[in-house]
Image (spheres, rainbow, N blue to C red):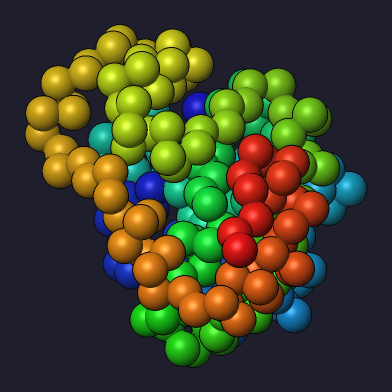
């Protein structure tokens, strides 16, 4: 199984020993800037001899308990699914998609170094467009809508456990603070011009994921 959790690795650091092409490329947040996303884009055509062994050893070395399954959740992997699929054909991929209006509001309003509304909308659109291209090539893939996860948590988590062939532990819900009104609060931060920009930039892609434009 491959998701992403850099066990024992501090925030903003990368696992030592990974292929150079998977490096941070001048900062952990740089991948979020649309003009740099293509530098992070990897497919099966980028696989080189030794990549699988190098990456498997790096992940194994980063895990606190090597007997457990690896959850790898580095955000740039949304651009690398086909590359990782080629290296780990038995991997399971989970992708969470969120209403781009709420997603942009959450980031653009607090992370100015990632750009404003336009830049964040371009980032969402480009990243999730690549995912649309790649998902049909993945052997084991599940798309989760954030809105379903927070509003129908038990069902979605049950589906996740099934997809990953894990023992179902819905007790995790009782140990979590799940808020279903976050999107509404974020959408209230957007003005009419913000909504217009997001509609224009993300419109086609968001409709592919079942989201509507906002007026």
* Rendering quarter of residue 83: top right
Q: Is residue 91 left or right of residue 36?
A: left
Report the residue at 79% width, 29% height from top: 136
Q: Residue at x 38, y 68 (%)?
A: 188
Q: Is residue 75 left or right of residue 8?
A: right
- Does residue 212 show up? yes
Q: Is residue 212 above or below residue 24?
A: above
Q: Position of residue 69 (x, y in %)?
A: 38, 28
The residue lying toward the viewer, choosing from 164 and 123, is: 123
In the rendered structure, the answer to whether residue 96 lies left or right of residue 189 reads: right
- Give the residue drawn at x 31%, y 62%: 185
Depth check: give the residue in front, 185 or 39. 185
Tally of numbered discs:
0
Q: Residue furthest bottom?
A: 113
Seen as rendered, the residue at the extreme right is 45
Q: Quadrant of residue 90?
A: top right
Does 201 appear above or below 99?
below
Position of the C terminus, as image quadrant, is bottom right
Residue furthest out toward the front: 215
Asked whether residue 119 appears in the rendered view, the answer is no
**Whether residue 149 is situated above or below residue 122 in the rendered picture:** above
Q: Position of residue 19 (x, y in %)?
A: 65, 59
- Residue 5's x, y, as percent? 38, 48
Instruction: List x then y, in percent, for residue 33.
Output: 63, 78
Q: Residue at x 50, y 37 (%)?
A: 145
Tell me if 6 is positioned left or right of 154 in this view.
right
């Amino acid at each position: 199984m491959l998701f992403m959790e850099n066990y024992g690795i501090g925030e903003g650091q990368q696992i030592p020993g990974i292929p150079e092409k998977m490096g941070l490329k001048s900062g952990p947040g740089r991948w979020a800037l649309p003009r740099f996303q293509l530098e992070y884009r990897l497919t099966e055509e980028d696989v080189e001899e030794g990549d699988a062994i190098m990456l498997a050893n790096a992940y194994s070395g980063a895990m606190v308990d090597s007997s457990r399954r690896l959850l790898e959740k580095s955000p740039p992997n949304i651009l690398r699914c086909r590359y990782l699929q080629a290296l780990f054909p038995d991997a399971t991929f989970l992708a969470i998609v969120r209403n781009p209006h709420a997603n942009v509001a959450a980031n653009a309003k607090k992370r100015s170094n990632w750009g404003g509304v336009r830049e964040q909308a371009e980032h969402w659109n480009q990243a999730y467009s690549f995912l649309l291209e790649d998902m049909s090539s993945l052997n084991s893939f599940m798309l989760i809508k954030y809105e379903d996860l927070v509003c129908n948590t038990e069902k979605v988590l049950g589906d996740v456990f099934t997809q990953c062939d894990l023992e179902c532990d819905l007790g995790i819900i009782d140990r979590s603070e799940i808020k279903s009104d976050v999107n509404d609060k974020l959408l209230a931060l957007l003005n009419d011009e913000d909504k217009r920009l997001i509609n224009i930039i993300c419109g086609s892609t968001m409709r592919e994921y079942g989201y509507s434009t906002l007026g």
